[in-house]
């Protein structure tokens, strides 16, 4: 591969924040309305309309409708959420659940057009009350940080999760270019993900990197991938305070991956976690980058791993490039994308009010980050991850349209309000339980699966992490 000079060469640092389980429409469906319009659309000649949530979008509320019995009893989309915990019950997000949300059935034919009408009935199966919450989408006024960043810089309205799957598989795509055939968080073993990651690649080519973690517990990224367990990699895993200080002092590494907190006062935005906490976390990331010593040479990407059961009207396309020859549940060949998620790109090299889509035949998905890192750092073919999806993915180069960096820095106030404390008496979600199981495997806990099955509450998971952290510190 021959690397040509590119606009990416203006960057010295790329910072990525991946939040949890929100669809594009849930977070940004009403970003541009009426008098608020984007100024630039990329690539040239693309549709000059923001793909927002249509107010006539609805979902049937009658389960029998999907068997051809009875009326749809539609519930329309609602502009604005009742509060920052909407939806207040964790939606279903297993592979079959997501397939039903997209198609209205669990066994679509190849190339079948997605109806995007199964979100409400899927949510009704778990919501104790007010299932119509799944049709509520936040306004820009409710989520001012991500909304102002999107309007001040760039947002992609056609970025899809890499597969119609849960958190672990999609996070695997962003770090390794494949989910290794996994489509659900559980049954889980970290050894399902015993593959090289982009961090191993960066270590090999001697490009510095750090995963910063806003938690007292271990990095979720490190726990997921056994090839990151090596003690020699310990300096590459730091806390969120370190990120803020490194940004201030101009000591950020070339590539930074910043994790929210997933358990105690979780600010990851995973339903029903408080979105206000997520907004505050994102503001802290933005403030550290924008006020840091190397703002003019930094790109910040904010995205979400998957939609988490939240509604979106835009059908995800077929024709995804399978990353490898592995197959998932029911022979799934990874030939279609998951539901659309927000992707906001921030840099002084980006014009205000930009909306972008892929300049190639393939849409943006999480592997676009890996393709961007490949071209930016000029990673040789022998070293880059062996993923056909990465090889096909469009990069972020086109978004950097300016010849000189902007001199303005948008003033984004710290989000006001009082967040709701999330009780630790609740059962752990699939991701939290998976992290506990990864920890158990990493440190050789006897009967790891049974031990984690017995963690009935989130407090039990927190205690489990604390106990093993204390054991590791003993001489």
Image: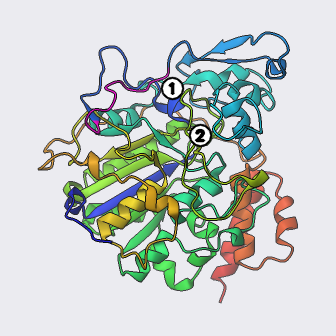
Where in the figure is residue 129, as x and y percent of width and height?
77, 22
The Cα–Cα distance between marks 1 and 2, rounded to whole angstroms, is 14 Å
Q: Is residue 136 magenta?
A: no
Q: Is residue 49 magenta?
A: yes
Give the residue at x 24% y 38%. 410
Where in the figure is residue 243, as x and y percent of width and height?
39, 62
* Residue 94 visible in image: no
Q: Is residue 454 shown above or below 408?
A: below
Prevailing SS of the magenta stretch: loop
Instruction: Name the image quarter holding residue 451.
Output: bottom right
Q: Is residue 418 shown above or below 446?
A: above
> How crowded is the residue under tag 1: few (<14 C-alpha within 10 Å), some, or many (20+)?
many
Q: Range of the magenta residues?
A: 42-53
Closer-to-camera residue (257/160):
160
Does residue 79 appear left or right of residue 383 in this picture?
Answer: right
Closer-to-camera residue (350/105):
105
Where in the figure is residue 61, as x and y percent of width and height?
75, 17
Q: Is residue 341 shown above or below 403?
A: above
Instruction: Name the image quarter holding residue 421.
Output: top right
Residue on which the image places disc 1: 138
Judged from the image, the secondary structure of the residue bearing numbered disc 2 is: loop
Image mark for residue 327:
none
Judged from the image, the secondary structure of the residue bearing numbered disc 1 is: loop
Image mark for residue 307:
2
Where in the figure is residue 141, as x and y percent of width and height?
41, 24
> How crowded is the residue under tag 2: few (<14 C-alpha within 10 Å), some, or many (20+)?
many
Does residue 447 appear left or right of residue 27 in this picture?
Answer: right
Closer-to-camera residue (25/235):
25
Closer-to-camera residue (120/182):
182
């Amino acid at each position: 591969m021959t690397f040509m000079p590119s606009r990416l060469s203006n960057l010295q640092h790329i910072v990525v924040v991946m939040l949890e389980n929100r669809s594009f429409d849930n977070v940004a469906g009403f970003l541009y309305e009426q008098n608020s319009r984007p100024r630039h659309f990329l690539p040239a000649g693309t549709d000059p309309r923001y793909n927002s949530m249509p107010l006539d979008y609805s979902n049937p509320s009658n389960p029998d409708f999907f068997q051809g019995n009875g009326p749809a009893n539609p519930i329309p989309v609602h502009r604005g959420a009742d509060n920052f915990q909407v939806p207040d019950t964790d939606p279903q997000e297993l592979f079959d659940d997501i397939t039903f949300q997209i198609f209205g059935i669990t066994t679509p034919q190849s190339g079948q057009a997605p109806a995007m009408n199964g979100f409400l009935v899927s949510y009704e199966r778990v919501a104790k009350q007010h299932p119509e919450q799944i049709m509520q989408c936040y306004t820009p006024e409710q989520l001012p940080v991500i909304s102002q960043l999107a309007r001040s810089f760039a947002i992609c309205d056609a970025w899809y999760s890499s597969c119609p799957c849960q958190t672990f598989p999609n996070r695997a795509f962003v770090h390794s270019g494949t989910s290794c055939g996994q489509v659900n968080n559980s049954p889980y073993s970290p050894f399902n993900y015993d593959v090289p990651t982009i961090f191993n690649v960066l270590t090999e080519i001697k490009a510095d990197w750090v995963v910063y973690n806003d938690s007292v517990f271990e990095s979720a990224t490190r726990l997921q991938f056994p090839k990151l367990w090596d003690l020699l990699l310990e300096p590459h895993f730091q806390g969120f305070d370190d990120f803020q200080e490194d940004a201030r002092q101009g000591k950020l590494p070339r590539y930074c991956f910043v994790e929210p907190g997933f358990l105690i006062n979780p600010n990851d935005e995973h339903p029903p976690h408080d979105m206000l906490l997520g907004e505050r976390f994102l503001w802290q990331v933005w403030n550290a980058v924008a006020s840091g010593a190397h703002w003019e040479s930094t790109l910040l990407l904010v995205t979400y791993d998957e939609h988490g059961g939240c509604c979106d009207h835009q059908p995800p396309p077929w024709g995804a490039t399978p990353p490898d020859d592995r197959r998932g549940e029911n022979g799934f060949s990874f030939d279609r994308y998951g539901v659309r998620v927000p992707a906001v790109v921030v840099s002084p090299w980006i014009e205000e009010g930009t909306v972008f889509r892929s300049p190639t035949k393939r849409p943006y998905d999480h592997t676009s980050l890996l393709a961007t890192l490949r071209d930016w750092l000029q990673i040789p073919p022998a070293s880059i991850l062996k993923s056909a999806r990465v090889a096909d993915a469009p990069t972020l180069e086109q978004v950097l349209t300016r010849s000189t960096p902007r001199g303005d820095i948008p003033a984004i106030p710290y989000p006001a309000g009082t967040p709701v404390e999330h009780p630790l008496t609740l059962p752990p979600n699939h991701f939290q339980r998976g992290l506990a199981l990864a920890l158990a495997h990493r440190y050789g806990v006897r009967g790891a699966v049974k031990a984690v099955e017995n963690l009935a509450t989130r407090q039990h998971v927190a205690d489990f992490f604390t106990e093993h952290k204390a054991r590791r510190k003993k001489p």
